[in-house]
């Protein structure tokens, strides 16, 4: 059963009159969490578009870069998006329900936030409304301010992140500590690892920008330490 078939099933299971918010309560264990991840990205993208005021073609294409949507399942994705835009529940309600669904799995929540950044910056611009939206979602998810800046720096032109923060090491770390941290992050972001933690295979492409940033931070610090 494909992820989009399961999404359709999850949507059709809703009682008449319930908002999309109710879907998240039904998706708490694999493989449903992969479905939940996809629905979360679509739903929060819809709320972000509503906050920004428009949905650009570039943003739609950016979503398709992350999630492959078969032609036969386009209506399912559109239904999720439209329900999210029409639902009276605000984006903070969605973010809290998503946080509840994934609990302490900060790695998945970071993946989700990264997907939103990928979509937000696809049109070549990054608006103040988008920054406020993503910053608030990050707060609700429980990410640190440094963690938010690290993700933001991968996608927003002009935004920077300390290479020590990118690798999660202190400024006083030894060369060997930095090297081990770098290797651990490269391993953690291997496609198989992402799939194992509930990120659908369609979304594994998110790791590409992350690995570029991780390797860049390693190169910068290795050069200084050498």
Image (spheres, grey):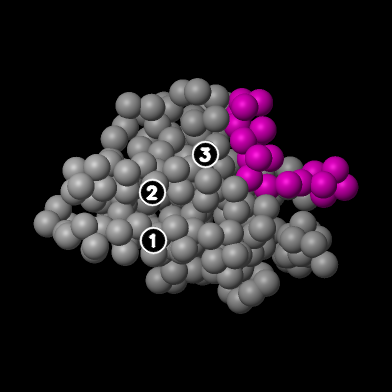
From the image, give the main secondary structure of the stretch colored magenta: helix
Q: Residue at x 26, y 58 (%)?
A: 178
Marks 3, 2: nearer the viewer: 2
Q: Residue at x 52, y 50 (%)?
A: 207
Q: Classify 10 Å Cα crowding around label 2: few (below 14), some (14-19), many (20 and above).
A: many
**In this view, 140 is above or below 119:** below
Q: Which residue is mark 1?
A: 183
The single residue placed furthest to the top in the displayed view is 124
Of the image marks 3 and 1, the number of the one nearer the N terminus: 3
Q: Residue at x 68, y 40 (%)?
A: 64
Marks 1, 2: nearer the viewer: 1
Residue 172: percent from left, percent from top = 12, 57
Report how far apart the C-alphas of labels 3 and 1 lie in the structure.
Answer: 24 Å
Report how far apart the C-alphas of labels 1 and 2 lie in the structure.
Answer: 9 Å
**SS at circle 3:** helix
**SS at circle 2:** helix
Marks 3, 1: nearer the viewer: 1
Q: Residue at x 54, y 66 (%)?
A: 193
**In this view, 113 is above or below 101:** above
Of the image marks 1 and 2, the number of the one nearer the N terminus: 1
Q: Classify 10 Å Cα crowding around label 1: few (below 14), some (14-19), many (20 and above).
A: some
Hey, which quadrant is residue 4 in on the image? bottom right
Relative side of 144 to 212, left or right:
left
Q: Which residue is mark 2?
A: 214
Which sits in the foreground, 24 or 158?
A: 158
Region rendered in magenta? 55-75
Of the image marks 3 and 2, the number of the one nearer the N terminus: 3
Relative side of 203 to 116, left or right:
right
């Amino acid at each position: 059963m494909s992820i989009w078939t399961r999404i359709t099933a999850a949507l059709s299971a809703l009682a008449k009159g319930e908002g999309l918010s109710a879907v998240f309560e039904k998706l708490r264990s694999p493989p449903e969490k992969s479905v939940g991840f996809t629905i979360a990205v679509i739903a929060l993208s819809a709320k972000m578009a509503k906050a920004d005021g428009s949905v650009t073609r570039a943003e739609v294409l950016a979503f398709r870069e992350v999630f492959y949507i078969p032609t036969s399942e386009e209506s399912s994705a559109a239904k999720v998006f439209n329900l999210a835009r029409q639902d009276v529940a605000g984006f903070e309600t969605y973010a809290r329900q998503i946080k509840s669904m994934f609990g302490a799995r900060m790695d998945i929540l970071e993946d989700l936030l990264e997907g939103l950044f990928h979509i937000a910056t696809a049109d070549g611009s990054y608006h103040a409304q988008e920054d406020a939206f993503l910053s608030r979602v990050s707060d609700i998810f429980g990410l640190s301010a440094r963690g938010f800046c690290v993700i933001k720096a991968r996608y927003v032109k002009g935004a920077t992140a300390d290479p020590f923060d990118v690798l999660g090491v202190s400024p006083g770390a030894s060369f060997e500590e930095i090297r081990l941290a770098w290797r651990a992050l490269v391993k953690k972001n291997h496609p198989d690892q992402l799939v194992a933690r509930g990120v659908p295979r369609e979304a594994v492409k998110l790791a590409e920008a992350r690995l570029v940033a991780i390797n860049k931070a390693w190169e910068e610090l290795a050069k200084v330490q050498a």
